[in-house]
Image: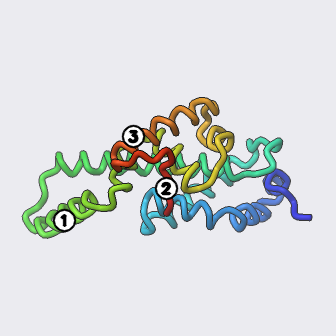
């Protein structure tokens, strides 16, 4: 029988190399989630950040929880949020700093990419318009298949909050997509 995540994490406190089993079990799923949230170019680095943070926090892991997925998704969601904050800070800085004359071609490339992304799939735009917390709940439930309880654990919020955020997000997505469907699904 395979040792559960809690057992592996517990043993890794004294034997750090054992933590590799957690990476092997969960990295593909977390990479997929991070790629959906941040893009494939950034997903590898974000995955490394996620597992580095998990490794550093492993001694504080609640060993009553046999499955580390919600814990890892919570860390990954925090990495996404930090990436978004860094990105906003960078864009604000770019607005303040005047570009050098030779940077015009680069600015045109950036502007073209922003326009192209803005005209992306309707669902992407609708998801982007959601509040961060609502988007996190939608992506963790619909795209990653986590239960309400697992999402609550991952985000450190009550299950009732997960339900209300998901309900609100679905209403907004239906309105943005112009559908009367009761169920809006998100697939990567």
Residue position for label 2: 186
Circles 3 and 2: CB distance less than 8 Å? Answer: no
In what quadrant of the picture does the N terminus appear?
Answer: bottom right
Identify the element where label 1 is drawn: helix
Say which label, 3 or 1, has the lower sequence index: 1
* Extreme residue in the right direction: 1
Question: CB under 8 Å between callouts 3 and 1?
Answer: no
Q: Of marks 1 and 2, which one's residue comes earlier in the chain?
A: 1
For label 1, count other residues whose C-alpha is less than 10 Å away and answer few (under 14), some (14-19) or many (20+): few
Distance from disc 3 to disc 2, alpha carbons, whole Å, reads 13 Å
Q: Residue furthest left?
A: 101
Tell me the number on the disc at residue 57: none
In percent of width and height, residue 144 lies at 59, 56
User: SS of the residue at dot 2?
Assistant: loop
Q: In this view of the protein, which residue sits in the foreground, 143 or 56?
A: 143
Q: Is residue 153 left or right of residue 113?
A: right
**52 left or right of 61?**
left
Real-space Cα separation, disc 3 to disc 1, in angstroms: 28 Å
Disc 3 designates what residue?
172
Q: As displayed, is residue 183 above or below residue 45?
A: above
Residue that carries the numbered disc 1 in the rendered image:
112
Q: Residue at x 19, y 68 (%)?
A: 109
At horizontal 56% and vertical 50% (from top left) the residue drawn is: 140
The numbered mark, 3 or 2, whose residue comes first in the sequence reads 3
Look at discs 3 and 1 and give the one toward the viewer.
Answer: 3
Residue 163 on image: x %, y %: 57, 35
Can you tell which quarter of the image residue 105 is in?
bottom left
* Mark toward the viewer: 1 or 2: 2
Q: Residues within 10 Å of mark 3 (few under 14, many from 20)?
A: some
């Amino acid at each position: 029988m395979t040792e559960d995540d809690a057992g592996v994490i517990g043993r890794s406190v004294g034997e750090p190399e054992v933590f590799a089993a957690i990476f092997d079990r969960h990295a593909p799923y977390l990479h997929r989630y991070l790629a959906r949230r941040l893009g494939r170019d950034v997903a590898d680095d974000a995955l490394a950040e996620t597992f580095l943070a998990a490794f550093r926090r492993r001694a504080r892991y609640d060993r009553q929880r046999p499955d580390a997925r919600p814990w890892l998704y919570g860390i990954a969601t925090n990495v996404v949020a930090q990436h978004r904050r860094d990105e906003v800070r960078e864009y604000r800085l770019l607005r303040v700093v005047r570009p050098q004359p030779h940077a015009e071609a680069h600015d045109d490339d950036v502007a073209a990419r922003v326009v192209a992304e803005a005209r992306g799939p309707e669902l992407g735009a609708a998801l982007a318009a959601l509040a961060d917390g609502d988007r996190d709940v939608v992506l963790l439930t619909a795209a990653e298949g986590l239960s309400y309880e697992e999402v609550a654990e991952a985000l450190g919020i009550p299950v009732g909050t997960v339900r209300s955020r998901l309900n609100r997000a679905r209403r907004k997505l239906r309105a943005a997509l112009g559908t009367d469907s009761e169920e809006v699904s998100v697939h990567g």
